[in-house]
Image: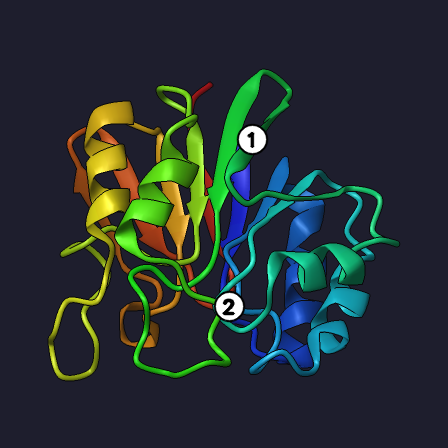
Amino acid sequence: MKFLCFSDLHCDKDAARRLVHLADEIDVVIGAGDFANQHRGIADTIDILSAITKPSVLVPGNGETVDELREATADWPSASVLHGNGICIAGTEFWGVGGGIPVTPFGDWSYDFDEQQAADMLHGCPDHAVLVVHSPPRDTVDHDSAGRVRGSQAILESVRSRKPTLVVCGHIHSDWGKQVKVGPSIVLNAGPQGVVVTIDS
């Protein structure tokens, strides 16, 4: 199965148009959050992305809530918004958890969750699924511009125990485009330009 993975559009219309074009050649689109900027402008990118007819799996970032994302995608028939739940597409299981994890230093506007809340939302993730999260697993593709790790321990523990085939995240801009492996799992910090990943199903 061929995936087009992206994150952190932050209202970038040009990046959204590029993703629409790239989606023609793939099976499933994965959007790992932050379509908006601090709850503003979510329609700037979603209205463009809604031209994608391939199945699309989205999670909220810390810049929009799950309710805001669901409302914005109401007229995008092929999109599924996940947050503490999953979906099966063509025999492949997907599980999604959005928001900033752990709680960010950005203040009240940021849509954040602590590690225990994250663990609760990750609890139902099937083994060997595709895991879509806004925040990276800790000490993977989560190094900020000063080199500090900013990812989630709960997500890391879920990756170690559930062994997803692919983990798609974003959030930490300085590690956009980077991939690592945690055991058998590929962990990708996608970024806004779009990364195509092929996984044998």
Q: Residue furthest right?
A: 75
Q: Is residue 149 left or right of residue 9?
A: left
Residue drawn at (78%, 42%) of the image: 78
Identify the secondary structure beneath mark 1: strand
Labelled pair 2, 1 in contact (Cβ < 8 Å): no
Name the image quarter holding residue 88: top right
Name the one closer to the observer, 37 or 90: 37
Kind of residue indicated by mark 1: Gly
Q: Position of residue 1 (x, y in %)?
A: 53, 28
Name the image quarter holding residue 142: bottom left
How many other residues sit within 10 Å of disc 1, few (<14), some (14-19) or many (≥20)? many
Residue drawn at (50%, 69%) of the image: 192
Q: Residue at label 2?
A: 193
Name the one closer to the observer, 124 or 28: 124
Residue drawn at (43%, 26%) of the image: 124
Q: CA distance from mark 2 to mark 1?
A: 25 Å
Q: Residue at label 1?
A: 86
